Amino acid sequence: MKKLSNANNKIRFVVAFVVLGMSIPSFAQNKEIIPLWDKIPGEIQSKEYLEKIDADKSGVANGVRYVSQPTLTVYLADPKKSNGSAVIICPGGGYGMLAINKEGYKVAEWFNTLGINAFVLKNRLPSDAIMTDKSIAPLQDAQEAIRLVRRNADKWKINPNKVGIMGFSAGGHLASTLATHYNDKVYDSKDNISARPDFSILIYPVISMENGITHEGSKNNLIGKNASSESIAKYSNEKQITAETPKTFLVHATDDKAVPVENSINYYLALKNQKVPAEMHIYENGGHGFGLGVKGTNQYWPNACEKWLIANNFTLKPDGYVFTYFKGNGEDGLHMAYSEDGYKWETLKKDASFLTPEVGKDKLMRDPCVIKGGDGLYHMVWTVSWTDKGIGYASSKDLIHWSKQEFIPVMAHEENARNTWAPEITYDEKSKEYMIYWASTIKGKFTETDSKEEDGYNHRIYYVTTKDFKKFSKTKLLYEPGFNVIDSSILKGKDGFIMFLKDETKVPVQKNLKVATSKKLTGPYTKASEPITGKYWAEGPTAIQINGEWIVYFDKYTQKKYGAVKQTAKGWEDISEQVSFPKGTRHGTVIKVSSDVINELKKE
């Protein structure tokens, strides 16, 4: 065959789509598509053997058949979120087609969200029409795919020691074949680059060619209906495992009627016998071909896989969370806890204080609110006293070393101001300003909601803005909801700003959390919602989005414990029993931080 350049191969690939009237799938648009070979080993040329695309009504390719020109579609992750790991994805399809979208492009997009570089392999499908030996052609493509990725490691910012293989169904057979036959000399490589994957991920894989357990279509397509016992044994990959087989993650459903679950079970047991690290997730149901998961418990396998990738250092450790809080009356200062998932919280510094209060009448550090600002610094404000007319402020680069504490007299101009409680900060990226806001009672104001039961306290929310924490705007009223309001916390949402707040009304009793929204940080804010918390007294809301869902933490102060609610499609769900906080935790703030920040805090 006349040697084709890479450029000519690319043209040939694109022309195939145009001739067939199909579009490249949306998931693959703007992605680099690279021919695997300059000269395909063992090729038989056939003008009648033309690639066929199975597309949906919108022209998106869901499947590919009759592949004669194997390619890699390149999905590079954000280098800032990657440690250089890469994975080659082998779609399934019984060795008769490739489910290139569901088990290829979509999976590559998911890997990119984890910071992992992904490459979708469009491998040749076994055929005597275009191959001198159809049983080795897919393995040739898989070996060359690994070598090609390692060959371009510098260009793609990939760690050549963190390149894995993944396969679905028959693609799982190809992936497990590479994992066990990476040293087989099935073509003359132009270099000595290893074809051994550093890990494998096998999703409802075909593993065995043995009768009674194999997928007959995959077996027949690869080695034929009348395959010899030697071929059956050779491509029954559970029989080919050695101590050098790469560590493996397996997923299967018990009710898989296409590829029996024993394929994964036997492979896992063989790995275990050879002391190869392995993890297997067997789901009660899901059948075959559930891709990234559709319903039931099988939809959570990507989460389990992500944890496995993190544990094995194939992706950067994810961001975590820090909770800043006080204990007792706030005399000893700033306490912190951390969490990896936002549910289980553990103390830092053995629950000792990170910063002792020095300013204000009573030198307290209650209600510490910490945010990370546009300048990269952590900024903190807090309540310094029950009766003072100002708040405390300090900043830090690392949450460990803090600037000199300052007193900001935000209510000094108000002769009748009784207090400044529970201050918080929100940064407005658009205006590059910080808004500091708090609850104050001013004697003689809002008399219509005065209440003897609250000892004369009748709060509203006030604010100032600043760009540098040196010069501040005049104090203004931020929120007047028509009731005694305290403990507001404002975060940027999808369509504006969301204020979580406490209705402090005692008669008739409220003592619950509500929500208001605004297009602008400085308001105006909407009427407060119905309560989002239950029939208990709650205060000190702090919120964050985890996996796209708002979680609001709060102090169940009469019960002396912390609780939480989560926003769902049906409303706010109480998840207090799912979260755990250090004993004695009081009103604070949760922020998202890098794993490096948490690791440094753990050293204190």
Image: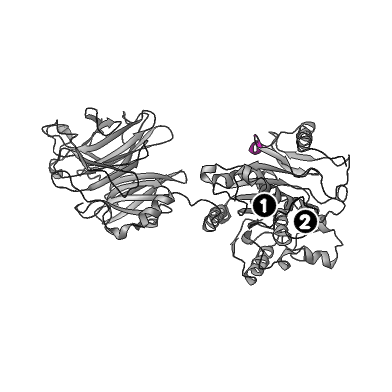
The kind of residue on which mark 2 rests is Ser
Query: In the orientation shown, which residue stands out farthest toward the bottom?
Result: 273
State which region is magenta: 25-30
Does dot 2 land on a helix, a strand or a loop?
A: helix
**How many numbered callouts?**
2
Give coordinates of residue 251: x percent, y percent. Answer: 62, 58
What residue would you read off at disc 2? 218
2 w.r.t. 195: above or below: above
Q: Position of residue 276 (x, y in %)?
A: 62, 67
Q: Looking at the picture, how far across and down is residue 286, in whole percent?
A: 62, 55
Q: Which residue is mark 1?
A: 289
Q: Is residue 515 above or below residue 341?
A: above
Task: Report how far apart the C-alphas of labels 2 and 1 lie in the structure.
Answer: 14 Å
Q: Secondary structure at mark 1?
A: loop
| Residue 547 position in % (x across, y down) | 47, 46
**Is 575 or 534 nearer to us in this picture?**
575
Residue lying at 39% horizontally and 52% vertically, measured from the top left: 598
Q: Inspect the image, locate mark 1, and give the three-letter code of the amino acid beneath it.
A: Gly
363 vs 492, left or right, is left
As drawn, is 281 to the left or to the right of 4?
Answer: left
**Any part of residue 170 in sight:** yes
Q: Earlier in the sequence, mark 2 or mark 1?
A: 2
